Image: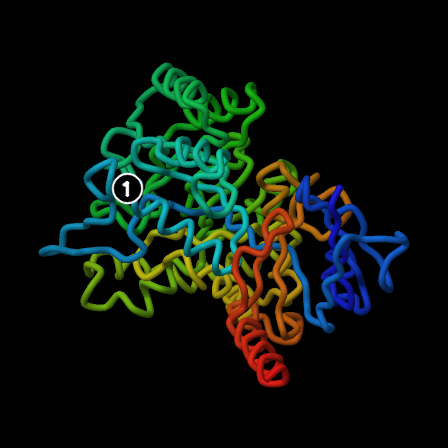
Amino acid sequence: MTTTNYVNAAIYNHNQQKFIFNQHMIVDENTGKIIEVGNGRTTRQVCDDVVDLNGRFVMPGIMNAHTHITDMPTYWWHNGEEKRHPDSREVCTMFAIRNMQDALSHGITYMRNVGAEFDIDVEIKKMQEKGWIKGPKIMTSGRAFSITGGHDSESTYEVDGIDEVRKGVRQALKNGVDNIKMMVTGGVLKNGETPDDIQFTLEEARTAVSEAHHKGKTAAAHAQGNAGIKEAVAAGFDTIEHAFDIDDEAITMMKEHGTIIVPTMNAMFAIYKYGRGVVPDWAREKVILNIKKHFMSIAKAAKAGIPIAMGTDAGTPFNGFQNESAYEMQLYVEKAAMTPAQAIDAATINCAKAMHIDQEYGQIAAGNYADFLVMNENPIDDISVVGHDKDVYQNGKRVHAQEVVNELKATQKIKKISAAI
């Protein structure tokens, strides 16, 4: 066993909702897991290597519970026609690889993909497990499910009726997906429908959830309007994606069912902020109609104690795979009245719970994988610093080095050479 001891660190503790100073963390380089966290330097006598973090701030790697890795981070519009989804398997694969590389270098160490053309995320995961592709570890969904002509139907499996839903979900599970994604309502980015448009019946939705849970898999519901949210909660979905319109009854139902919300606030905010003249008017008008209600709903749910898991809907207009995850966390603080600690939890332990992997991910603790970020500033004081350049570690290996650190090392090297001369 080869071990590295990271000392003199301020490590985030989600139980205490703060960073604890003068901590150490020992990582087993062979397994990529943390074997000890504690005060001071260590209780162990010898480690193979010691890394002094000089009081810098360590938090778990960012987890993004709502991504579309095969999509273009920005849309290409031609005469008002959407070109979000590339036309070929090859182009989709190219975007997936590039998007995952971008995500990892910006601190996203684990993601849940909730819709991919050609089920490409399933194959991407296989290649990643062989070490062929760098990027966040990935929970897959393959293609999502919609009704015929329903939300995002150009890239989904279209199914109608209980029997087609059951057959489709079983086939997706056979294909190797980790999660079932279902478009329960309409949405913003398809013309001729609204977030209040319920598209699957309760019986169809329950069938999808039942089949997923029967195989020990999770189920996620695209549900934006109030009635659709309640239908999705009643159907037993593990997570509600977007959730534009939450009332007291919905909150009561979520508490009874243990439902988690994945807000994707930046998907709305980016269109609102940057979409004028690029995103068609019919889409932006739906954003303008719903955005304040959306932010108020997430604030209401968070205040009521409903778990919030961070997700961005990466791949939608002006909403990519770089610092958008950090900005999503910032929006939770600025627009949903969450504390910085709650935002960190949303992007770490809550995501891990939503994906049912919280025994090994989502916190800096013995037995967890050593996926973590090292930052110069304290995000509890200013959540926006999560978006600053930082060191990124995955399985205990540094996969992105902060530029200022590299510059410092270069300066030190030059000084040593000069001294030798």
Closer to us: 369 or 416: 416
Image point (66%, 60%), residue name = 59
Image point (49%, 39%), residue name = 131
Instruction: Give the structural element (helix, strand or loop) at label 1.
Output: helix
Residue 159, image quadrant: top left
Closer to us: 6 or 171: 6
**Residue 179 placement (x, y as % from top left):** 49, 32
- Residue 293, compared with residue 199, is above or below; it is below
Label 1: few (<14), some (14–19) or many (≥20) C-alpha neighbours in 10 Å: many
Q: Amino acid at mark 1?
A: Cys
Q: How is the image coloured?
A: rainbow
In the shown orientation, is residue 32 left or right of residue 97?
right
Q: Quadrant of the C terminus?
A: bottom right
Q: Quadrant of the N terminus?
A: top right
| Whether residue 217 can be seen here | yes
In the shown orientation, is residue 76 left or right of residue 312?
left
Closer to us: 73 or 106: 106
**Residue 164 placement (x, y as % from top left):** 34, 17
Image point (53%, 55%), residue name = 399
| Whether residue 349 can be seen here | no
Residue indicated by mark 1: 92
Residue 408, image quadrant: bottom right
In the shown orientation, is residue 367 left or right of residue 307?
right
Q: Residue furthest front?
A: 421
Closer to us: 126 or 312: 126
Residue 18, image quadrant: bottom right
**Residue 151 placement (x, y as % from top left):** 29, 39
Image point (52%, 54%), residue name = 108
How many labels were placed on the picture? 1
**Residue 374 placement (x, y as % from top left):** 63, 64
- Residue 182, compared with residue 285, is above or below; it is above
Q: Residue furthest left?
A: 79
